[in-house]
Image: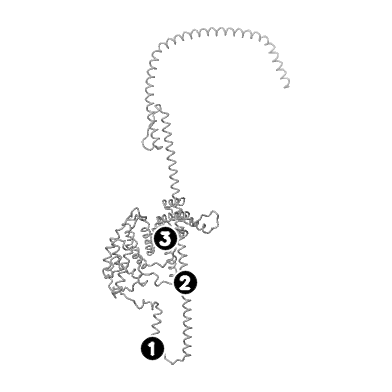
Amino acid sequence: MTAHKAFQFCKQYKRSTEFRRLCEIIRNHLANLNKYRDQRDRPDLTAPESCQLYLDTRVEQLKIATELSLWQEAFRSVEDIHGLMSLVKRTPKPSVLVVYYAKLTEIFWISESHLYHAYAWLKLFNLQKSYNKNLTQKDLQLLASSVLLAALSVTPYDHKYGASHLELENEKDRSLRMANLVNFSLDSKRENREMVSRATLLSELAAKGVISCASQEVKDLYNLMEHEFLPLDLASKVQPLLSKISTIGGKLSAASSVPEIRLSQYQSALEKLTALRVLQQASRIFQSMKIDMLSRMIPFFEFNVVEKIAVDAVKHNFVAMKVNHLAGAVHFGNMDIESDVLSSHLSVLADSLNKALSLIHPPVQKPSKPSENLTSLAGVVEKEHRRLLARKSIIEKRKEDHERQILEKEKIEETKRLTIQKKSADEERERLLKEQRLREQQRIRKEIEEKEAREAAKMIEDLTIRGKNKKKIHIEGDMTKQHAMEVVLNQQVKERQEMEKKLAKLAKTMDHLERAKRQEEAPLIEEAFQKRLEEEKILHEQEQLREIELSKQHHAGDLQEKNRLSRLLEHKVCILLATAFSSAYSVL
């Protein structure tokens, strides 16, 4: 399924913000299906198949939420599963219920709701015992020990003592809500469920035989805590049992749906319970005690821790005691200033002043008449009525103040939550950007490496093709561009050296051939030279004769031309004289 794949993605990459958003989308989708019931293509949520698919998705959501330690989202997932279970009349699969209660134990333990944690363990134990027929005796003993230790870890006093009316109402609503989640079992038709408590839980464990299935160390611890009265030796007897119990645990067999149980998680709660039992039993037989002696009786904690435990116990009326650090002693028993009758300092002061006034000025007793008695009685009734009205108004005002404080506190917490959420979103956005930049750098680096590898391969291929022997070049290790360039350069240097050797050898051969050729052609050149001299001499003589003949012919032609032009000499002289006379006349 797509939702399951998305959950696995969030789990693998620790995407808590995306996981919350995904859970909210699925939750809104189911809410819209319930809101718009008249749609034609709306799936039938009451159908077992549809509901089972939704349950499987919510169970996977619950598993991932606990693995990511998103406990608030895990609790909301539990509420979603409970709501889906309420839609169908059929009993859910035991495997779904086992996961439901197993995760519920983790959620209640983290939220320090030890009572509901113990009830969830009881439900898980009953499911395993009823439906897992292959459950081994060792696994059953571990489960029963976990149930009993979870019940013992519950604080033995009620936290409702001394709480205001509004706090009691809020606690009642919370208790009903938690009990509704825990009590969802196979008998879900039951409507009237009594409020859960530690005493009823232990009684139920004894009635159903869970205590008898636990290990011997756990049963001995239960008897010491609940049935023995040993104020001086209780801690010394409990301490070795706790040491043994903390080593018990481990993975269960494959037949069990619960993967692993660790009893050591209850050690701190059991040590606190031991301290409370020692204080409770000591208050019954001692009026006062040295602080050093009380510290020796409770070796688990320092006295300042014991004092904090005692303060909480006194606050909830579990034990009556006070500590006198000046005297170094602890006093047990009800103190006048701490009694329920005189719970307010103002009421104590008023009563004391009234008593003193009555002793100094005793009232004068006058014989009273019936009419006077009735008048005084009416005045008393009116006065009492006004007092009650004033008290009611005070209570209402305190209630309003308390509600306003709660609203302001919720507003502050909401502001803090939004700030934290925004900070987480900014951090997540920064992380995503950083991862994106890193992936982009890796992609670019990979592309560069691939490009260099291709260029290196091309260089090697070109070198192989250019080579005369056509022998393939083998490179050991990863072929990089730098490595390929070194190989190509070495190969080119090697080829150049071989070519230089060949050229030197060829030059030497050509030198020998040229020397031999010149030695052979020297007499032939001399013979051809002499022959050429004779031919040029004959040619020179012929040219001389031809030149003489041409000179004679030119001289004869020049003489004829001279004779022809000599006849014009007379006419030339006459023309020159006429020209001179005309020039002189023009000047005059």
Image location of residue 185, percent across then percent down: 41, 61
Residue 338 placement: quadrant: bottom left
Q: Is mark 2 on a helix, strand or loop?
A: helix
- Up/down of 101 relative to 542, above or below: below
Quarter in which the C terminus is drawn: top right
Image location of residue 194, percent across then percent down: 41, 68
- Up/down of 409 relative to 362, above or below: above
Q: Mark 1 points at which residue?
A: 360
**Marks 1 & 3, CB-CB < 8 Å contact:** no
Q: What element carries label 3?
A: loop
Q: Earlier in the sequence, mark 1 or mark 3?
A: 3
Q: Name the residue under label 2.
A: 401
Answer with left or right where residue 435 lies relative to residue 226.
Answer: right
CA–CA distance in space, label 1 to label 3? 72 Å
Residue name at image x 46 percent, y 72 percent: 399
Image location of residue 215, percent across then percent down: 30, 61
User: What residue type is disc 2 on?
Assistant: Asp
Characterize the local packing of mark 3: few (<14), some (14-19) or many (20 or more) Cα atoms within 10 angstroms: few
- Name the residue nearer the viewer: 70 or 135: 135
User: What residue type is disc 3 on?
Assistant: Leu
Q: Which of marks 3 and 2 is in front?
A: 3
CA–CA distance in space, label 1 to label 2? 41 Å
CA–CA distance in space, label 3 to label 2? 44 Å
Characterize the local packing of mark 1: few (<14), some (14-19) or many (20 or more) Cα atoms within 10 angstroms: few
Q: Which of marks 1 and 2 is nearer the N terminus?
A: 1
**Numbered circle sitting on residue 186:** 3
